[in-house]
Image (cartoon, rainbow, N blue to C red):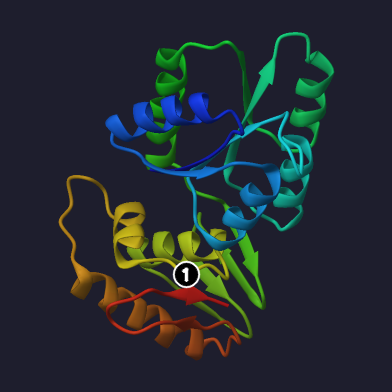
Amino acid sequence: MRILVAEDEQQLSHVLSSAMTASGYQVDIANNGQEAVDQAKENAYDVIILDIMMPVKSGLEALKEIRATGNRTYIMMLTAMGEEDDKVTGLDAGADDYLTKPFSLKELLARLRSRQRRDDSYQVDVLEFGDLTLNGNDQSLESHNSISLTNRENRLLQYFILNANKELSTNELINHVWDENETADQEDLWINICYLRQKLQAIQSQVTISGEKTGPFMIA
């Protein structure tokens, strides 16, 4: 999983980054709320962790701005004792979870493992993007007309749409679309992207997937 940690306390930020990296996660750091918003716009994350009290832009302000773009990434807020109102405000604004400082690293890592397990089986029922409607239940794609997708194409297009207008690397796509016990390489990904492009053309959609064989790729 790729995780964004937005925390202005340098020591805590370093501890969190080290622990998550040691657990096999890819970690990016933001030192204030505005940096978190900017990085969330540019990169695809599986989890975003926001401290509520940050300079330039607070965690709550960053949360609202990130959600306003349509970003559905799982967001966890870090709050201090006595900030009950902030917890409620954060959850109402679109946060998925929160941890109260001081918290146990073991608990945080356990929550991340739990989130990763749910992500492996997670599927969105219906997604809309541009002139497209993707139905994950019956694996159909609709624009001016409709067409059926394979399970792999469905998962790939879901990940593209959930991270629309972001450059996605070959490794990111393979790691999120293929299961751990499946083998896949650049050639497998390219074949599926080519099939998706053909199907987008077949239903006369204006949505395109850009990128050459080696990546990165972007849907727009």
Q: Please state the horizontal and vertical placement of residue 79, each as a whole percent of the image.
A: 68, 20
The correct choice, above or below, for 158 with respect to 131 in the image is: above
Q: Please state the horizontal and vertical placement of residue 187, each as a whole percent of the image.
A: 19, 75
Say how many tags the image has. Answer: 1
Q: Is residue 148 left or right of residue 206?
A: left
Occupied quadrant, residue 64: top right
The correct choice, above or below, for 207 with respect to 177 in the image is: below
Question: Is residue 139 at all visible to an observer of this figure?
Answer: no
The correct choice, above or below, for 159 with respect to 73 in the image is: below
Type of residue at label 1? Glu
User: Which of 94/135 is in front?
Assistant: 94
Report the residue at 69% width, 43% height from top.
33
Q: Quadrant of the N terminus?
A: top left
User: Which of 75/135 is in front?
Assistant: 75
Question: Is residue 31 at all visible to an observer of this figure?
Answer: yes
Occupied quadrant, residue 8: top right
Q: Please state the horizontal and vertical placement of residue 205, each as a whole percent of the image.
A: 59, 86
Q: Is residue 123 left or right of residue 35?
A: left
Q: Is residue 16 left or right of residue 7?
A: left
User: Which of 79/18 is in front?
Assistant: 18
> Which residue is under mark 1?
167
Q: Quadrant of the C terminus?
A: bottom right
Q: Please state the horizontal and vertical placement of residue 16, each as a whole percent of the image.
A: 44, 27
User: Which of 4/73 is in front?
Assistant: 4
Q: Tag 1, which secondary structure?
A: loop
Report the residue at 36% width, 30% height from top.
18
Q: Residues within 10 Å of mark 1 (few under 14, many from 20)?
A: some
Report the residue at 29% width, 60% height from top.
171
